[in-house]
Amino acid sequence: MGTMEAREKNEYFKEFLTQKLNELLEEANKTVSGMTNERENFPDPTDRASMESERNFTLRIRDRERKLISKIQDALVRIENGTYGICEECGEEISMERLNARPVTTLCIDCKKKQENDEKVRGL
Ligand SMILES: [Zn+2]
């Protein structure tokens, strides 16, 4: 690694994450307007029950999207203040390989593995 300048790397991920964020926000808007349409199409109370479970499903997905959206926003803040791509645990640079696989990560692969192991140990 180290072939890419920090500024280049930031620009690259800024573009990538901004695009991803816009996609998610667009998708979230679609979900909201889709829900409104369904409500108008099913005035029958028996349909309302199945509609409710569908709505809960949509909300669960949206919850996951919301979390991802906030993670992306955090990553964009880190790009702005120059801490993006630096492990918050050990302060080492996170490899490009890992950032490409998981652009919103705040941990290098070693610290992530350590954290997962700790969680496993606590889980037992
Ligand atoms: Zn680390």
Image (cartoon, grey):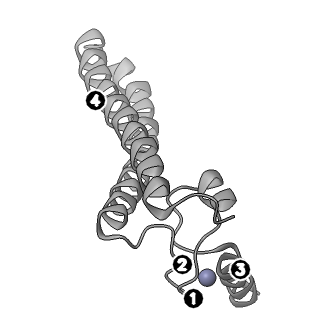
Q: Quadrant of residue 45?
A: top left
The reply to whether discs 3 and 1 touch (Cβ–Cβ < 8 Å) is yes
Quadrant hosting ligand 1? bottom right
Mark 4 nearby-residue class (10 Å; few <14, some 14–19, many ≥20)? few
Q: Quadrant of the N terminus?
A: bottom right
Mark-to-mark CA distance, 2 and 1: 6 Å
Q: Quadrant of the C terminus?
A: bottom right
Mark-to-mark CA distance, 2 and 3: 10 Å
Q: Is mark 3 within 8 Å of ligand 1?
A: yes
Label placed on residue 110: 3
**What residue appears at the point 28 percent right and 9 percent down from the top-left corner?**
41
Image depth: mark 1 or mark 4 in front: 1
**Image vertical order of residue 55 relative to residue 10, above or below:** above
Amino acid of disc 1:
Cys
Residue identifier under label 1: 90
* Camera-nearest residue between 86 and 37: 86
Q: Relative to residue 87, is residue 111 drawn left or right? A: right
**What residue appears at the point 54 percent right and 78 percent down from the top-left corner?**
87
Label placed on residue 87: 2
Amino acid of disc 2:
Cys
Residue identifier under label 4: 29
